[in-house]
């Protein structure tokens, strides 16, 4: 299992457009990917879960990757987060 911690820098936080792109990107992987803020953890492959976290600028989110292609998923999704959020 791999873990990636990231502090949101986008002034809008995780809003609809990047959440949709994130969900689309993670759906390409077989591994289980969760996104968490505080004590709330959601399936990163479900847009309502990602949006339901209500992550704003300055919030830390933790993504966990667990499964066969976790290394590839970790590389792509951590890069996506840094470039877009």
Image (cartoon, helix red, strand yellow):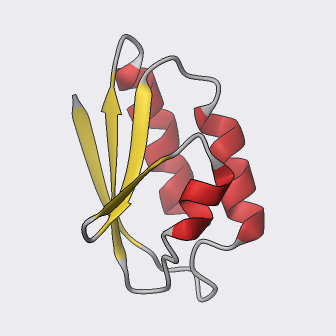
Along the line of sight, which residue is nearer the eye, 42 or 81?
42
Residue at 64% x, 58% y is 48
Q: Quadrant of the N terminus?
A: top left
Horizontal placement of 13 versus 1: left or right? right
Given residues 9 and 54, the one toward you in this image is 54
Can residue 38 be seen at all in this image of the molecule? yes
**Residue at (25% x, 43% y) in the render:** 3
Residue drawn where x is 51% and y is 57% of the image: 81
Instruction: Pinpoint residue 70: horizontal percent, then vertical percent.
Output: 37, 23
Residue found at the very far right of the displayed protein: 17
Indicate whether 37 appears above or below 20: below
Residue 14 image-quadrant placement: bottom right
In the displayed structure image, the side of residue 12 where residue 82 appears, left or right: left
Location of residue 37 in the rendering, given as x and y in whole percent from the top left corner: 34, 68
Indicate the quadrant where residue 23 lies.
top right
Label total for image? 0
Residue 31 vs residue 45: left or right?
Answer: left
Q: Residue furthest top?
A: 68
Q: Is residue 85 visible?
A: no
| Residue 28 position in % (x across, y down) | 64, 24
Image quarter in which the C terminus is found: bottom right
Above or below 33: residue 36: below
Query: How far from the left and from the top, in percent, is residue 16?
Result: 74, 68
- Residue shown at 43%/36% (left/top)? 33
């Amino acid at each position: 299992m791999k873990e990636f911690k990231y502090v949101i820098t986008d002034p809008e936080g995780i809003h609809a457009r990047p959440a949709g792109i994130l969900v689309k990107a993670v759906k390409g992987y077989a591994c289980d990917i969760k996104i968490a803020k505080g004590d709330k953890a959601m399936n990163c492959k479900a847009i309502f879960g990602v949006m339901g976290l209500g992550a704003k600028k300055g919030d830390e989110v933790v993504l966990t990757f667990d499964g066969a292609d976790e290394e590839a998923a970790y590389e792509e999704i951590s890069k996506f987060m840094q470039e877009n959020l």
